[in-house]
Image (cartoon, rainbow, N blue to C red):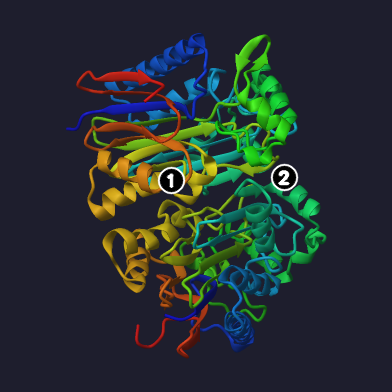
Amino acid sequence: MGWAIALHGGAGDISLSMPPERRLPREAALRHCLRIGVDALQTQKHPLDVVELVVRELENHPNFNAGKGSVLTTVGTVEMEACIMDGKKNCGAVSGLTTVVNPVSLARLVMEKTPHIYLAFEGAEYFAREQGVETVNSSHFVTPENVERLKQAKEANRVQIDYTQPIQKDGKTENPIADGDGDSQIGTVGCVAVDGNGNLAAATSTGGLVNKMVGRIGDTPIIGAGTYANSLCAVSATGKGESIIRGTVARDVAALMEFKGLSLREAAAYVVEECVPKGKVGLVAVSASGEVTMPFNTTGMFRACATEDGYSEIAIWPSVQE
Amino acid sequence: MGRWAIAVHGGAGVDPNLPQQRQEEAKQLLTRCLNLGISALRSNLPAIDVVELVVRELESDPLFNSGRGSALTEKGTVEMEASIMDGPKRRCGAVSGLTTVKNPISVARLVMEKSPHSYLAFSGAEEFARQQGVELVQNDYFITEENVGMLKLAKETNSILFDYRVPLETCSAGAAAAMDSTLKMNGLPISVYAPETVGCVAVDSEGRCAAATSTGGLMNKMTGRIGDSPLIGAGTYACDLCGISCTGEGEAIIRGTLARDVAAVMEYKGLGLLEAVDFVIKERLDEGKAGLIAVSRNGEVTCRFNSNGMFRGCATEDGFMEVGIWD
């Protein structure tokens, strides 16, 4: 028993030859967010507060696909979605946000201040104004990198499930567009946490898919798909939204623990290996007893975790022993 | 070669004082839709086609809360949502926030088959519908006088949760008192039980399961509010083993991932359909009230609910057919 936390910045076909100038800032961000989360748990903050504040931090970071740095729709706009859930199965979700600086916080407000679970588009934006959350001009969320990604996706006439590294200006490319779906380096962000009393929470936030249709909703705000928590565990998934929805990924991790008696690690590994096609999913999960696991079936997943007994890890590609 | 089976619903949570005439109308509609589905199954239409055509029929009839006859938002408009899932390969499609599409379930199907995505909402979904050339109408086509009256009542009692069970804590003391007395509209007694959702599940003779759900959502809901009906795993689910469509308290269905749980219990615990559904209704709803219809690939069908009644009907290939409202 003891607290545990895990967070991710997206799973996908993260090129093994990612140059340091791209890798280092992302690793630093993961380290920073892990630190914030660990500090919060050590000061007895409730996991619901912990996952919200970590995801807010990830949303604010422009290198991950959530909040600022969100990928663009086919018309070049940003439509953000997020979801939060605690171990008692209270939950809140939002979609279609265009001006809200921290979607995860709005999701929390939906959970706590309305009789509903899920608000979207104009209604969600209106609610945000009613609640007085921080809103900005949508251009705030758009980064040059994402403008470039959208351009490339349109040129390749493809919806990128995550998005590829933009082709280097000096012509050195991994030829990312050549590979099948155009997996990306940065998919979604999320955080799961448990405290010493077994209180659990999960939160996920995203800008979705590059070049997505306007109005497209992914797995992130769908309870049981991209986000889930109950008394056994908390899960946040990332990858190809359509596959995660169909595979009810987050729910299935918990269901396997409950109905088949699998451990957290076994359940998560099973879901990632058997329930979703290869190259499409990664997740982070913690159990009520303080275990943590971060499996993925993609090339890599930006991730970090720590447990009370001193273990911690920050990584992008599979660890040596896996 | 399996046996086909089909079930339909028109919502869980029924006013115990529902006038007899309304009960008859409901049963007739359920019967008509069931027969439509049965005909289709007999002519070997795949389950996915069957559930779509049955739900289209339910959407077109103003009696239940979907398509025409949808509950109204706080603004007096209609925002419809739906989802559909095909058991083999677990393909799925969903829509929310539709305002001009005559048959939301068909757009959900088009999302599944003609778009690279699984779920489209609001203006993006409307635009997609337009591009696909589906039948569009003005928003007022969906609005019925009865629902205008219900909305007025909901606003008067200041109840934003106007589902079949009015949570008294959201009403003023006066309104709560009014709940107990017989409320009247147009001289007829009515209650605060609002119509719910519609759905259909079917398994064809090849053993393929499918599920579809459609709704206008909660009466007096906030604009932009999404319920359980379009959420895969909550209101709708289908896989190799079964097809499920749920109805009732949206929040309870979402938190309980009700539709997925039936299938998960079958898959991971090895329970049969009937046991799985009983388990989920008994153990997964906590304080919530809901119901569901389900079929299995073996041709079994069941309808279960812990709410006060559920408009439902089911039929199997060996001649069984039943339409009901109460326990």
**Dot 2 and dot 1 residues touching (CB under 8 Å):** no
| Left/right of residue B143 with respect to residue A191 in the rendered view | right
Quadrant in which the C terminus of chain A is drawn: bottom left
Q: Is residue A14 visible?
A: yes
Label 1 SS:
loop
Q: Residues within 10 Å of mark 2 (few under 14, many from 20)?
A: some
Q: Amino acid at mark 1?
A: Leu
Query: In the rendered structure, the residue with mark 2 lies on which chain?
Result: A
The residue where tag 2 is placed is: A123
Quadrant in which the N terminus of chain A is drawn: bottom left
Q: Residue at x 75, y 59 (%)?
A: A100
Comparing marks 2 and 1, which lies closer to the viewer?
Answer: 1
Across and down, in percent, residue A274 comes to: 32, 62
Q: Taking B96 as reference, is A132 above or below it?
A: below
Across and down, in percent, residue A138 comes to: 78, 59
Q: Quadrant of residue B221?
A: top right
Q: Amino acid at mark 2?
A: Gly
Q: Taking B159 as reference, is B241 above or below it?
A: below
Question: Between residues B103 and A195, which one lies in front from this camera angle?
Answer: A195
Q: Residues within 10 Å of mark 1 (few under 14, many from 20)?
A: many
Q: Taking A224 as reference, is B124 above or below it?
A: above
Label 2 SS:
helix
Same chain check for tags 2 and 1:
no
Q: Is residue A73 visible?
A: no
The residue where tag 1 is placed is: B285
Q: Residue at x 60, y 38 (%)?
A: B167
